[in-house]
Amino acid sequence: MRSLNNRIVVPVTRRGPFRAIRSAVVALAVFASAPAVAASLDGLAVDVQNRSEPVLCAEKDNVTITLANPQVRAFRVEAAHPPYIGMIQRDSFEADWTACDMSADPVHKVPVPPRRQTLYEEIAFWVVGLTLESYWRPATTTVRIGDRVERNIHLLQLWQIRPMGGEEVLVLYPQDGYWRIRPMAPHGMAPTAFGSSFLVGPVEDDGRPVVRIKEVAFDPKAKTFTLTFERGGSATLNLVRTDHRINAIDVVYDKPISGRPFAMLRSMYVTEFNNDVARIAVREKGAKGWREDNIMRFGKALATDVWLGRTSPSQHNTSSPDMVFNGFSDTSSPKRPKSEAPR
């Protein structure tokens, strides 16, 4: 999963009049600042379980946090810059293969040549699909972008315009259901690192946790992904806010997921100074304050909010974002984010 580094593809230079690009940036900023519509202050409490295991290899996802509740139909997932983002003097993107042995990983060759193709493009953002030479799972998921249908896509990238180029803000691995998101970099900084991944849908184990997706469709106008699961059911992921502070997605299922997690965070922790996530904080049902712990010591909780991140820099993906899961709801809309002013 981690063999693809955070800068696998250099963005294609965008052509066109500077005025058009500047207008697109302004329009995108207006879209990014639009408030999300939601229902109330507190969400449902969900069962948060820690299935993490110690590991020496920094390129193996050993952190596993599951979220389960057979009533949940909607929630929000957010990525935000770590609190030390303004103090980073040297960012780190390099893979660390120390103590790693991937020889036992399954390998599935692809019947078509490796390629990178732009699947959708407008001035403000564009979608890129990558076909790799091989992958650890067979490529069975169909990818639909608007009216365009593609197969053998291992990686989907969503790029967003920034001055003098573009910035990758979201990736999806359709063949195993892993997502990564990040905010746009703070003004004056280079793009930040990706870090933790999350899964959306009925999670199951196939050597490692996966979500089997039959089809993923992206509506560029609505900025919405629709997932159709092999186990039945579907989900929509609406990109509600992507700016220099936060990347927020509202997830809505057509029906609740019972008997297994409906979402999962996957990440890496070797030591306090070599990790993609080191801390967890939960707002437990009925509690007067948050409970905080080291990610490897945490056990379980019944919580309405879950934060996972770092409070001090790591030598691995130093600038990668913190992650938040909240707004759990039994309706078709996540509960209103707590950062919004009361109405």
Image (cartoon, helix red, strand yellow):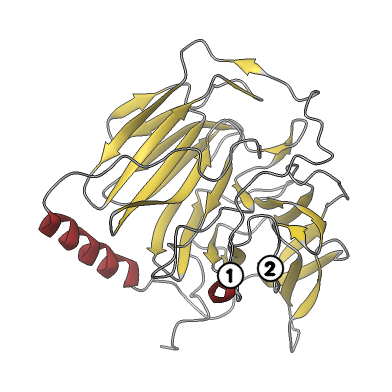
Compared with 215, 64 (above or below) is below
Q: Residue at x 74, y 69 (%)?
A: 280
- Marks 2 and 1: CB-CB under 8 Å? yes
For disc 2, the neighbor class at 10 Å (few under 14, some 14 to 19, many from 20) is many
* Of residues 218 and 322, the one drawn nearer to the viewer in this rendering: 322
Amino acid tagged 2: Pro
Q: Say which label, 2 or 1, has the lower sequence index.
A: 1
Q: Position of residue 38 (x, y in %)?
A: 44, 72
* Of residues 157 and 286, the one drawn nearer to the viewer in this rendering: 157
Disc 2 designates what residue? 313
Name the element at disc 2.
loop
Amino acid tagged 1: Ile
For disc 1, the neighbor class at 10 Å (few under 14, some 14 to 19, many from 20) is few
Label 2 to label 1, Cα distance in Å? 8 Å
Name the element at disc 1.
loop
Left or right relative to 228: residue 270 = right
Q: Let me know if residue 188 appears in the view.
A: yes
Q: Which mark is residue 88?
A: 1
